[in-house]
Image (cartoon, helix red, strand yellow):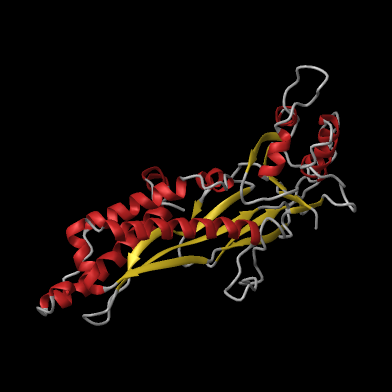
Amino acid sequence: MIFAKKIMGNSKSALAQMKERDQVRTNTNIHEQIFVNAGLLLPNQGLIPQDVYQEFDNVTVERMRSDDGDTFLNDLLPLTRSVNIGKLVHKFRQASDAGNAQTSMTGQIGVNMDQVEYTYDGSLIPIHDTGFGRNFREFNAQSSEGFDALIDDQRESVATLRAHIADSFLDGSVDKQGNSIVVDGISWDGIRGDSRVAQIQLGAAGVNFDFTDTTKTGAEVRAAFIQVRDVLWIDNNCGQDATYYVSREVMSNFERRYSTSFDSKTIQEELESMQGVAAIKSTSKLSGNQLMAFPLDANKIRPVSGMGINTVAMPRPVYNSNYNFVVWGAVGWEVRTDFAGNTCASYSSVF
């Protein structure tokens, strides 16, 4: 999802994406050279210096790795799979079990042959973008000031795009009209509503528990949390310990002591000691009585990137056109279920 040295060295697809980005930047400067060669006004000698692009790239990595309260995005970044920008959907197979094992003393009873069956699923990889721009005369004036204001524009644009990408994880890939984007029958409806995610009802029709309620005892919180955990750990046979992300209101409640009768651990520490629980973290992207959970395992959940987040200049059609820049990337979300439909991701709320 970002262009970092470690990623470039381990992924041919990520390296190809970076080369495409650099070619776009070079082509824009070649186009800009037309105005320079024509001897037009000084403000049109607006080649984008390499050190400006370098600063854009540094800012992008810095902002994408920063913690804006969402928490889960930083945890998912290292799991990213890079693919070719031409892939609108990244498809994968779900294999059934195979083999009919048996026991005998001679091994002469004949072997029952079998083979796996397959179903297919995939990850939608939409493009996310935003932009910023400066008047063509103002741009030239900034060249004497190190383009500081332009870099500030880019920093805030990356922050906006980062928040948008985090929202797409929660609420799905939707177009401007709010409609779910569908390609080849594949869509992503977000952790809060996708069929690949176990949706757990915390209202009266389900667990019937409010994890923000400070009047509940530690034992009551633990009993309700076990019901939530068991949806993945038992019902879906998820073998990996899941990280649970909760709202700040829930986390505040979990900071209470588990018991007032003795010097106990906090409720959070008590819950983190349970089987199937890797950690409990808070996120500002959830509110009230909301929790979500998944293991930090690329075989179960990961971002899929068709183009890392980057900034490029748009070609200017005429000499007095403004200088416009696009911050963009192609990022989708892959939540894998097995052949039987079991999942390792859950979302809990009052529906």
Name above or below for residue 4 compared with residue 181. Answer: above
Any part of residue 240 in sight: no
From the viewer's perspective, tell me whether residue 143 is left or right of residue 39: right
Label total for image: 0
Q: Please tell me in which quadrant of the rendered image residue 218 appears.
A: top right
In the image shown, does 133 or 298 lie closer to the viewer? 133
Q: Compared with residue 83, is residue 45 higher up or lower down, i.e. above or below?
A: below
Please state if 224 lies on the left or on the right of 125 as rendered: right
Estimate the x, y position of residue 34 in percent, counting from the top left: 17, 77
Q: Residue 105: x and y, percent?
A: 85, 28
Please state the horizontal and vertical placement of residue 74, each as a whole percent of the image: 52, 45
In the displayed structure, does residue 32 sit left or right of residue 68?
Answer: left
Question: Relative to residue 239, is residue 140 drawn left or right?
Answer: left
Residue that extends furthest to the right in the rendered view of this protein: 205
Of all residues, the one furthest to the top in this rendering is: 262
Looking at the image, the residue that sits furthest to the bottom is 318
Q: Nearer the viewer, residue 317 or 239?
A: 317
Tell me the quarter of the image containing the C terminus. bottom right
Name the residue: 22% across, 74% down: 31
In this orientation, which residue lies closer to the viewer: 55 or 149? Answer: 149
Q: Residue at x 23, y 80 (%)?
A: 320
Report if residue 269 is visible in the image.
yes
Percent x, y of residue 79: 53, 46
Q: Residue at x 51, y 50 (%)?
A: 80
Instruction: Specify the quadrant of the image occupied by residue 164.
Output: bottom right
> Considering only vertical position in the picture, is 334 above or below 226?
below
